[in-house]
Each structure stands twice: as C-alpha cells, then as structure tokens.
Amino acid sequence: MKKKFRKWLAFALAFVLMAGVFSSMGVEAKAITLPVPKIKVSLGKNGTDVKVTINKTKNAEGYVVWVKGDVSYENYKGVDWNRNVDDYVRYAVIKKDGTKKRSLVLKSLPAGKISVKVFSYNEKNFGTMTYSAFSEPKSVTVTKEGMGYKTSYDFSNVKKGSIIKFGTYEQDNNLSNGKEPIEWVVLDKTKKNIFVISRYALDKLPYNYEGVDIVWEDCTLRKWLNEEFYESAFNQEEKDLIKSATVENFDNAIFDIAGGEDTKDKVFLLSQLESINTDFGFDSDYDTYDETRVCEATKYARNSESTDTCRWWLRSPGNGAGSAAIVYESGFVFSVGYYVDTDIVFVRPAMVITLNP
C-alpha cells in the first residue's frame, strides 16, 4: 500500500513540476470559448410584440440582446441606453444560466422593421469576462403599432400646443429600420377639427423646381405635399381623417405681391399671415426672433448638414413673383423671401385633421 502511495505521490509531484515548466514557457490551460449564439426572432399574434429566442449556447452564463429600430426611452423601460453598435440599442441582459430560459418578448414596438442580434458571456473564465461574437442579425416587420406608439386617433382631449403622433416618415436617416412616427404641434382646435404643423422640418425641397414667376397653386412643392408626401406618410385610416381644407392664398402683406387663387389642399404650408397669428401661439411681429417659430430639421432632412435649426418655407409670395417667403432659423419671418428654386430651405407640412370623421 505504501509503495502505491509513493508511486502516486511521485506522479502528482511530476505533474506539478511539468505544469510549472509549461507555465514558465508561456503555456496555459485552455481558455473557455463561447460559440456564436443562434437566435430566432418571431412576430407575436397581436402583430406588435416580437419574441427573441436564443438556442442553448455552450459555456454561456447569460445573453445580451441588442435591438435596432425606432426605439424610445419612454417605451423601453429598463433599457441600458447605449447606442454604439451600428445603431443598435442594448435592450436587456438575460442573466440566466445558459441551460435555462433564453427568451425575451419586446413589447410596445412601432410598426416597421425591427432587427435583433445577441452575444453571450461567461464571467468565470479565469476570473475575467468573456464574450462571444454577435449572432447574425435577424429581422422581422411589426405590422401594427404597439401600445407605446399607437395613436388612438381620438384627439378630442388635445389642446393648443399639444403634440400628437400621426403618420410616419423617414426621419433618423437610417433607411433600414423603417419610417418614424411624425410629431405634430396643435396650432388650433375647434369642435370639429384640429389644425396642426409638423414639429420638425421633414424634408428639404425647392418651392418650385424651375426659377419662374409662380404662385402656391401651381408650384411643385404643393404637388409634392399633396401627392408623394400624402401617399407615403399616411395609411388609409389616417387619410380618412385628413380634411381637404380651403387654403386662402393672401397677397404678400408687405410687398403686395399676388398670392394667387385659393386652393383645396390636404397638406399645405403656413402662410405669411398665419406665421404671425397669435391664436396659433406665434409672435405678431414679423421681425421678432420668435422661439415658437424656430424649427429643427430631422436627420433625414438635414442629411449631412450639422446645424439643427433650419429655414422653412411659407406658401406666401416674397417681394417678387419668383420668390416665396420663409422663416429664418432664429424665428424671424423673412417676407422678402428666397427664389423659388432655392434648394436650401426646409419643409414643415401643415394640415387639418377632423375630429368627427
């Protein structure tokens, strides 16, 4: 028995010595490796929720889920708000053993494309944190608005100055995640309608593509708003709520340049006189640097421009038949206007939404 013990002890000592030799040579025990997780992303039956399921991954102690889409802090409670991986947002950490539940339901999502990717981690790899590479992104299209984004289309309780969401348009300049909900400022309200203007400038276009004498009735921007923008931004339910409004096209109040005939429009721009209407919350002086007239442009509208605030078109003529009035970045109404074919002015749509369709 003693002989066997001495033999075992000698073997153990030899193993320790060899380990020391390998260590001194820079040879270490094999580290834990984490395979790339495989995931499945599926749309819930309600058309709004998205379920993320992660296959069991060897050596994983937990998983981190990243989401790409129109995410909002208000709608995603508990989000670790880091947007630094190709526009993905770190949504949640599943701190479960890799053999247990590996799923997560994303709720209150906007309609549009949602992309998900996941990596796993292990905290016990020689006392250090080890991560896998990201899984291949999986995408799904949310077909309905989630509760956090859904507009009830019941605007009966809104007040002047309220901000509502209605329609969608590209705004974050990330075409892969779909269009974003449009925010509108309520300028006025009656028993039957609300009058709104977009909170942000949504695009940048000339008033008219040709530099000619022209009025609102005939300009290309009116055509674009009532055709391309209208068709792109609103679904049928929303279109049914947009009133075909009689738009009064007054002459320029300072230079007496003709504004043309009144028009019937679904979508239009504010006029020179509307931009100084105190009932809408604006200052009554053209020359005032009015903060309520100051407007930011979306990333999509700005494209590569760095400044946030922008100049935006009014539908009224400027000091000549070939120009149109604008509002400066500072909120100053520039009644002289810019030439109609200028392409550095932004667009803030306005419209009337009916409360009793």
Image (tube, rainbow, N blue to C red):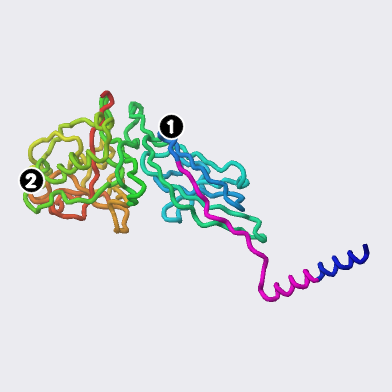
Other-residue count near label 2 (Cα within 10 Å), few / some / many at <14 / 14–19 / ≥20: some
Q: Which residues are magenta?
A: 14-41
Of callouts 1 and 2, the N-terminal one:
1
Question: Circles 1 and 2: CB distance less than 8 Å?
Answer: no
Res. 49 image quadrant: top left
The residue located at (36%, 41%) in the rendering is 112
Q: Residue 300: x and y, percent?
A: 30, 51
**In the image, what residue type sits under mark 2?**
Ile
Q: Residue 131: x and y, percent?
A: 56, 57
In three-dimensional space, the C-alpha distance between marks 1 and 2, rounded to whole angstroms, equals 58 Å
Q: Find out whether residue 39 is within the magenta segment.
A: yes
Res. 146 image quadrant: top left
Is residue 258 rendered to the left or right of residue 99? Answer: left
Pick the quarter of the image with the N terminus.
bottom right
Return the residue at label 2. 257
Front disc: 1 or 2:
1
Return the residue at label 1. 45
